[in-house]
């Protein structure tokens, strides 16, 4: 909660001033008290309710004034609101271990299928970019709404040696910087950057995030290039959230690539043209690093051990990525609550002070008439006709 006009809190001083004025008026009334011999006449002049009950309308009225005074400051609440300006960079691990068959037919095939469904489920306003990384990272498709181009790139994914998670994050940042002038490229020193390439400010207010996010899907740990946590620090400095997914189980399984999944390694070599197999192995996910990356950037880490879990993670991600925290003014709610409190106080005061008539008995004298009679302002009317 933040206040746009904090100096308006001075309006709250009206409440204690009203209490002081009420105390002063009550004190003056006590000084002008008179002595009477008829106790029955005094009881008739007083309201028929307890002291605690008489204070309820006053408390409600003053509470309404306090809430109204707080509303004058134009309070703002940080809430999650949907945005249609989001861009998602999907970085997929294509290292050789993605051919592990603990998830049938192998991890890369399942990840590719889940990525297709993820892309097809997005609305036309969401831009998606595709980054593939092994020993190096490359931008396959710049952020676009062209789903055909994205699906075609996924169908062409091939494996290679090495895992460069940190470089994949930096490549994704650079892809976002190309379309968002408020995000600096990974090689730009933020201390020296005052304006973006297209006139942007290069910064966002504290506590806010850019509408662009990075999703990193990997089955291992970083083996080459920049450290993932170092890359995450650059993303955090640019207010870009990074969501990480650790994919695969801890069950030993052989690595078997189909001919279509075999590609070159980081040095330009080739795994061969036919199906590629390896011994049974366990690929350990660096969950600590992936969790640290997500925490640093305001994202989340997810673990998916099979196709069903991976599909659930990717289907739930748009709900998180598509929400942006913004400061929304809530003055209207303060005014509404103040109106209800003041109205309730005034209404109860009028209702409890109304003249009461008992069936079969003469009307009850108003307290004001009897009080005036006690003070000698006018003679009390006679009960006899």
Image (cartoon, helix red, strand yellow):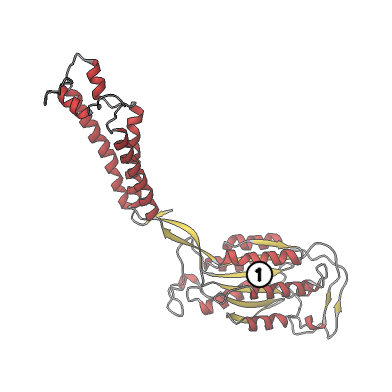
Q: Is residue 365 visible?
A: yes
Q: Quadrant of residue 360?
A: top left
Along the viewing direction, whichever of 324 and 225 lies nearer the viewer: 324
Picture residue at 36% right of the left edge, 57% below the top: 4
250 in relation to 113, above or below: above
Position of the C terminus, as image quadrant, is top left
Q: Is residue 224 visible?
A: no
**Residue 139, position as x, y percentages in the image:** 63, 80
Along the viewing direction, whichever of 368 and 105 lies nearer the viewer: 368
User: Which residue carries the number 1 mark?
Assistant: 216
Q: Quadrant of residue 102?
A: bottom right
- Tag 1: Cα neighbours inside 10 Å, few (<14), some, or many (≥20)? many
99 with respect to 53 (left or right)? right
Picture residue at 72% right of the left edge, 70% below the top: 223
277 with respect to 268 (left or right)? right
**Residue 25, position as x, y percentages in the image:** 20, 31
Picture residue at 35% right of the left edge, 39% below the top: 60
240 in relation to 1, above or below: below
Give the residue at the far top of this rendering: 37
Picture residue at 30% right of the left edge, 51% below the top: 8
369 with respect to 264 (left or right)? left
Along the viewing direction, whichever of 344 and 195 lies nearer the viewer: 344
**Residue 292, position as x, y percentages in the image:** 64, 60
């Amino acid at each position: 909660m933040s206040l746009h006009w904090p100096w308006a809190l001075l309006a709250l001083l009206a409440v204690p001033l009203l209490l002081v004025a009420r105390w002063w008026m009550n004190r003056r009334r006590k000084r002008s008290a008179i002595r009477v011999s008829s106790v029955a006449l005094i009881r008739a002049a007083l309201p028929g309710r307890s002291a605690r009950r008489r204070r309820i309308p006053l408390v409600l009225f003053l509470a309404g004034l306090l809430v109204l005074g707080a509303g004058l400051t134009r309070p703002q609440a940080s809430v999650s609101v949907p945005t249609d300006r989001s861009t998602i960079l999907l970085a997929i691990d294509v290292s050789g271990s993605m051919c592990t068959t603990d998830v049938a037919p192998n991890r890369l095939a399942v990840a590719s299928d889940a990525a297709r469904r993820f892309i097809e489920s997005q609305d036309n306003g969401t831009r998606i970019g595709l980054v593939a990384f092994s020993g190096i990272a490359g931008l396959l498709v710049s952020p676009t709404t062209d789903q055909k181009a994205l699906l075609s790139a996924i169908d062409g994914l091939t494996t290679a040696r090495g895992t460069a998670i940190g470089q994949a994050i930096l490549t994704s940042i650079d892809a976002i910087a190309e379309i968002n002038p408020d995000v600096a490229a990974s090689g730009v020193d933020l201390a020296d950057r005052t304006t973006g390439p297209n006139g942007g400010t290069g910064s966002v207010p504290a506590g806010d995030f850019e509408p662009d996010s990075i999703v990193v899907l990997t089955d291992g740990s970083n083996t080459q290039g920049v450290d993932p946590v170092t890359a995450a620090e650059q993303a955090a400095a640019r207010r870009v959230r990074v969501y990480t997914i650790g994919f695969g189980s801890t069950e030993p399984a052989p690595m078997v690539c189909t001919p279509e999944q075999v590609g070159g390694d980081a040095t330009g070599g080739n795994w061969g043209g036919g199906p590629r197999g390896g011994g049974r192995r366990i690929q350990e996910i660096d969950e600590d690093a992936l969790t640290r990356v997500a925490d640093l950037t305001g994202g989340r880490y997810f673990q998916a051990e099979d196709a069903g879990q991976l599909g659930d993670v990717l289907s739930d991600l748009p709900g998180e990525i598509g929400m942006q925290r913004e400061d929304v003014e809530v003055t209207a709610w303060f005014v509404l609550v103040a109106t209800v409190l003041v109205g309730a106080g005034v209404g109860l005061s009028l209702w409890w002070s109304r003249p009461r008539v008992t069936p079969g008995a003469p009307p009850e004298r108003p307290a004001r008439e009897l009080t005036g009679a006690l003070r000698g302002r006018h003679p009390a009317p006679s009960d006899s006709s």
